[in-house]
Image (cartoon, rainbow, N blue to C red):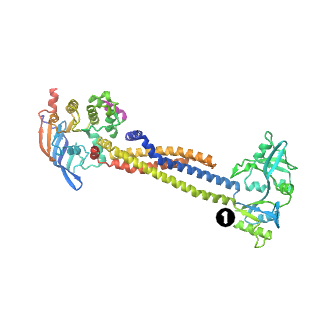
């Protein structure tokens, strides 16, 4: 570790989330605090029901915490209105979902272009950035294909390109390899490792130790609380040196 | 701008993907807009026709018709009850500005050389031309001196001009009526159709020619009376009635031997009756639009529901509520716009068809089309708002998890 600490991208303090289902109140998160620094690759692990997906929803501003503070790049975002949250989602956050979540009728190009459209990037710049992002995930030859013409692994790579195209502050991945065969999963993980090595901050939810081993740090959740927070042996810097 | 263009593209794509459903949905709007356009056209046509009629009937003109003179059980074939003295007395009423006595002969045969034609011949004074807004298309009309000297002249209608003088200038030529010869001095300018009657079928000659020469006698069938103002028409009609009863020495017990009619009032009355019908059709058009609007709302709700997940995805990559709302509002607007265009076309078609089938005078105006089209857009906006709002308010995380 060098002497200079990289800045915190994410700072959660005492975040709780209570779901209402009918008359029942279910506490999904019971006071979670941790920080993610620039360049980290954090895996969030836990049994199902441990609150890890809820946590990712809050990190991605798709969901609001019931209480607590969430600072994303030095901005308190827990209390912002929906329009500002949408803008931050579009500009600072890239999502990769287990189910890819591509728009069915749209081509790979259109899907990747979408976040740039919503952040009002001019058309010409959009085009170069989309092609660049698709190139980065090795899909330069699939630009005009719609999702049904692509394999699962290819669809997930389109999703990664869509997440990366806005140059987000943090890439959030929810079981990104959950629907993939092992070869495609390896492809996806090596892409994530590579962009992490190039400096991207990644927070990934997974239940698999094997997948989590690609991360630089593992946060374990149990019953809505942080149970363990451990750094792994490989740091992004070390990985780069190794290469 | 970027977002607007993209939203248009998305809306177009969504409609294209479900084009048949979209066509069915817009049917209500099509029918509504079509009926607005055609009702407006029929109504404007009718209004114009009434205006034309009133112009032809003369402004503030009432018509006094004399009945045939009867003696016991015998009725004269030609002689009417209105005498020149009656005409003069009516002309002296303070509210009357002009009187035009006239006598007519129906189905009269006139000839010129080998050509013959029938006409409705009017014996008139220049006042007649004046109050009924007649003008000469060629030559001149009947003048004061024609009347006072009893000159044997005639002004032909376009129909007789065509039949009697197919290939020569008729002015100065002679036509024959029975054993009498009349010199053609003018052609009446085109008047067109009035109700069932072709006004260009009428010919005109000085009043004394008809009353004195062709028929005999001095009485006239009819007097056109111009009243000073519209408000004075009814009291003047009453006054004329009293006057004529006194002139004709009619006892209390006997009925009038004349009729007094405000023909413009009759036209306006008929107009009011057809107005009720038009209001009804208009209301039906409104109901069709309402139903059309509900149809659009229904389709948009289905469309939003089908794309809940897609909305979640869009929100996750940065679409704010307003952008989502805009996208669905544009889709509804596009639907209603297509309905509006189709409705305008259908309306024009339907108007032309009924116009030619029913023989109605119709008038399709650009403003009425624009109004109908804007109404259809309004329907799209109003009924698209709620579904679009619903899409905009979807919770992103719930939308993403929606199966």
Pinpoint the chain carrying mark 1.
B
Q: Residue furthest right?
A: B179
Coordinates of residue A146 in the picture (x, y in percent):
33, 33
Determine if the magenta segment contains residue A163: no
Which image quarter holds the C terminus of chain B?
Answer: top left
Coordinates of residue B350 in the picture (x, y in percent):
56, 46
Q: Residue furthest front?
A: B73
Residue B20 visible somewhere in the drawing: yes
Task: Give me the residue at 46% from left, 50% from top.
Answer: B292
> For this view, does A157 lie left or right of residue A34?
right
> For this view, does A146 lie left or right of residue A240?
right
What secondary structure prevails in the magenta region? Answer: helix
Q: Residue furthest top?
A: A243
Q: Which of the 4 image quarters holds residue A153?
A: top left
Determine if the magenta segment contains residue A124: yes
Q: Which residue is mark 1?
A: B231
> For this view, does B380 lie left or right of residue B220?
left
Which structural element holds mark 1?
helix
Which residues make up the magenta segment? A123-131
Task: Give me the residue at 16% from left, 31% from top.
Answer: A237
Coordinates of residue B199 in the picture (x, y in percent):
73, 50
Question: Is B283 above or below relative to A137?
Answer: below
């Amino acid at each position: 570790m060098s002497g200079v600490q990289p800045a915190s991208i994410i700072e959660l303090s005492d975040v709780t989330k209570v779901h209402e289902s009918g008359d029942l109140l279910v506490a999904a998160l019971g006071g979670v605090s941790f920080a993610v620094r620039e360049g980290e690759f954090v895996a969030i692990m836990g049994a199902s029901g441990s609150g890890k997906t809820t946590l990712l929803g809050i990190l991605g501003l798709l969901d609001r915490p019931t209480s607590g503070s969430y600072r994303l790049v030095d901005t308190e975002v827990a209390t912002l209105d929906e329009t500002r949250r949408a803008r931050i989602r579009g500009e600072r956050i890239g999502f990769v979902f287990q189910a890819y979540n591509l728009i069915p009728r749209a081509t790979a190009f259109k899907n990747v272009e979408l976040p740039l459209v919503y952040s009002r990037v001019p058309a010409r710049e959009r085009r170069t950035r989309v092609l660049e992002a698709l190139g980065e995930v090795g899909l330069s030859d699939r630009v005009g294909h719609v999702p049904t013409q692509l394999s699962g692994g290819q669809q997930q790579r389109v999703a990664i390109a869509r997440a990366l195209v806005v140059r987000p502050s943090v890439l959030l991945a929810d079981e990104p390899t959950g629907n993939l065969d092992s070869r495609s999963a390896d492809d996806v993980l090596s892409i994530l490792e590579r962009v992490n090595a190039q400096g991207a901050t990644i927070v990934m939810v997974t239940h698999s130790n094997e997948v989590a081993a690609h991360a630089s740090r593992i946060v374990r959740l149990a019953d809505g609380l942080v149970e363990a927070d451990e750094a792994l042996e490989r740091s992004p810097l070390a990985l780069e040196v190794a290469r | 701008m970027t977002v607007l263009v993209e939203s248009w593209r998305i809306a177009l794509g969504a409609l294209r993907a479900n084009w048949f459903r979209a066509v069915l949905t817009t049917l209500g709007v099509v029918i509504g807009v079509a009926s607005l356009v055609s009702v407006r056209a029929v109504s404007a046509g009718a209004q114009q026709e009434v205006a034309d009629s009133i112009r032809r009937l003369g402004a503030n003109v009432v018509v006094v018709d004399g009945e045939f003179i009867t003696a016991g059980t015998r009725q004269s074939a030609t002689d009417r009850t209105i005498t020149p003295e009656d005409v003069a007395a009516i002309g002296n009423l303070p509210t009357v500005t002009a009187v035009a006595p006239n006598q007519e002969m129906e189905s009269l045969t006139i000839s010129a050389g080998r050509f013959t034609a029938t006409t409705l011949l009017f014996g008139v004074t220049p006042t007649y031309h004046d109050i009924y807004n007649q003008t000469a298309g060629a030559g001149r009309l009947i003048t004061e001196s024609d009347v006072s000297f009893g000159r044997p002249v005639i002004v032909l209608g376009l129909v007789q001009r065509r039949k009697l003088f197919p290939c020569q200038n008729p002015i100065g030529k002679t036509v024959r009526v029975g054993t009498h010869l009349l010199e053609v001095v003018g052609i009446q300018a085109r008047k067109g159709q009035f109700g069932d009657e072709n006004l260009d079928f009428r010919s005109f000659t000085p009043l004394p020619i008809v009353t004195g020469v062709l028929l005999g006698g001095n009485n006239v069938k009819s007097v056109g009376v111009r009243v000073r103002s519209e408000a004075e028409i009814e009291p003047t009609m009453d006054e004329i009635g009293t006057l004529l009863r006194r002139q004709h020495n009619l006892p209390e017990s006997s009925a009038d031997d004349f009729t007094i009619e405000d023909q413009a009032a009759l036209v306006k009355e008929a107009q009011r009756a057809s107005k009720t019908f038009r209001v009804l059709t208009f209301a039906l058009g409104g109901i069709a639009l309402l139903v059309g609007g509900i149809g659009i709302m229904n389709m948009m709700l289905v469309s939003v529901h089908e794309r809940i997940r897609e909305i979640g995805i869009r929100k996750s990559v940065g679409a704010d509520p307003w952008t989502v709302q805009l996208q669905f509002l544009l889709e509804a607007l596009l639907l209603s716009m297509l309905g509006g265009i189709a409705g305008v076309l259908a309306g024009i078609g339907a108007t032309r068809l009924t116009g030619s089938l029913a023989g109605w005078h119709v008038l399709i105006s650009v403003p009425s089309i624009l109004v109908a089209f804007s109404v259809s857009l309004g329907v799209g906006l109003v009924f698209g708002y709620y579904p679009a709002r619903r899409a905009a308010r979807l919770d992103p995380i719930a939308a993403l998890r929606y199966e």
